[in-house]
Image (cartoon, rainbow, N blue to C red):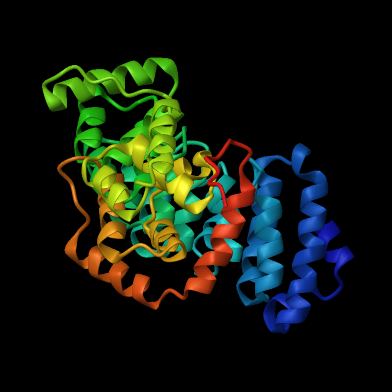
Amino acid sequence: MAEAKSLIPGLENIVRDGDPKRRGEAVRKISELFLRGASRFQPAHVDLFDGVLTSLVPQTEVEARSALAERLSDLVNAPPQLVALLVRDDEILIAGPLLRRSPLIDEPTLVDIAKVQGQSHLLAISDRSTLTPRITDVIVRRGDRDVIRRVAGNAGAAFSQLGYTGLIRRASDDGVLAVTVGQRDDLAPEQLKHLLAQSVEVVRRRLFDAAAPELRNAINRAMQDITGTPTHLAATRDFATAQRAIRKLHQADELDEGALLRFARAHQYEETAAALAALSGVRIGTIDQLLKGDRDDPMLILGKSIGISWATVRALMTLRLGPGRSPAAADIEEARQNFERLVPATAQRVLTFWQTRETASAIPLPL
């Protein structure tokens, strides 16, 4: 520590009376000295630096503390008291790097921080390479949508039965989360079945499309248990037959909103997609992706741009959820209001973008 004193004249005065700027400069110089020798320092040396830095850091500016936390976050022999001080900082720029990576942060500390800090701190914890069930239990209970999605996608996170129950419950109205949870290697068969049972048809299919072959088999087995009949989701849909049927309807001058409404109400997915592609001029690959998405906005835009009624748009919304399911009343009312407010010219501009974004073939209508 004599080297630190010679490097920074008047160190004792700076510790005692220095303003934040002078303290910040002292922290920078002392931390540089520590980082240069960290690989060869013995515990006694680390303790000396720990004492000096811990006395200086609390009164430094955010930028100085943030830079220091970033540099200490990967060190296995970082000053422990200093790390313990920085990781509990309310400012995420300071605590974040340590929460994400520091090997010095133990489970009790992470649990304590997860219980009291906000979503940005929970998000940082969710990025750690390993997380125990005690930690994820708190994250699942307190985390918002972004936090829950992040921790569910962390392969190094372990979940208790309670934690998985919470994840699956949250996935009931979050298709992205449902697909993420469904692909976890540690998801038990009963948990997969529970997840699928509460998921809408479009989410089940998205999960199936994203799954590895062995998981696809597990999904089909789970679906058979749920429905009581053999169920085989296909990885991709074959639109050829539907396209031929729609082409015949058009040739007979019978392809109109009424035909589209009948297909949607009968949950004839391929025919509905092919009819939408023909009526809108949007490629069927794009229509398929829009129908499989987890938002209703595309159906509102399609409906407004091709001039169909709210009743048909609502049928398209219901089609996306699968037989026997319908949107919540509040969601229907919100969608109806959005549909009424949507300006046709705006919808048409979005439609033009969709018409050019995919390379799959469309069903062109003659002028």
Q: Position of residue 316 (x, y in %)?
A: 31, 52
Front residue of this view, candidates 187 and 217? 217
Q: Is residue 127 left or right of residue 157?
A: right
* Image location of residue 68, percent across then percent down: 70, 60
In percent of width and height, residue 243 lies at 44, 33
Figure check: 259 above or below 4:
above
Residue 158 seen in render: no
Task: Give residue 222's quadrant in the image.
Answer: top left
Could you tell whether 203 is left or right of 278 in the image? left
Name the one closer to the observer, 298 or 363.
363
Residue 219, placed above or below residue 309: above
Residue at image coords 17%, 64%: 329
Residue beneath the point at 57% across and 52% down = 367
* 332 to 319, vertically: above or below: below
* Left or right placement of residue 179 versus residue 8 in this view: left
Q: How many marks?
A: 0
Task: Name the residue at the front extreme.
Answer: 252
Residue 316 or residue 338, whichever sits in front = 316
User: At 32% across and 48% down in the image, what residue appears?
Assistant: 260
Taking the image as drawn, is residue 147 in sight?
Answer: yes
Give the residue at x 53% y 48%: 282
Residue 112: image quadrant is bottom left
Q: Quadrant of the N terminus?
A: bottom right
Residue farthest along the left direction in this orientation: 228
Is 212 or 89 nearer to us in this picture? 212
Q: Position of residue 116 (x, y in %)?
A: 36, 64
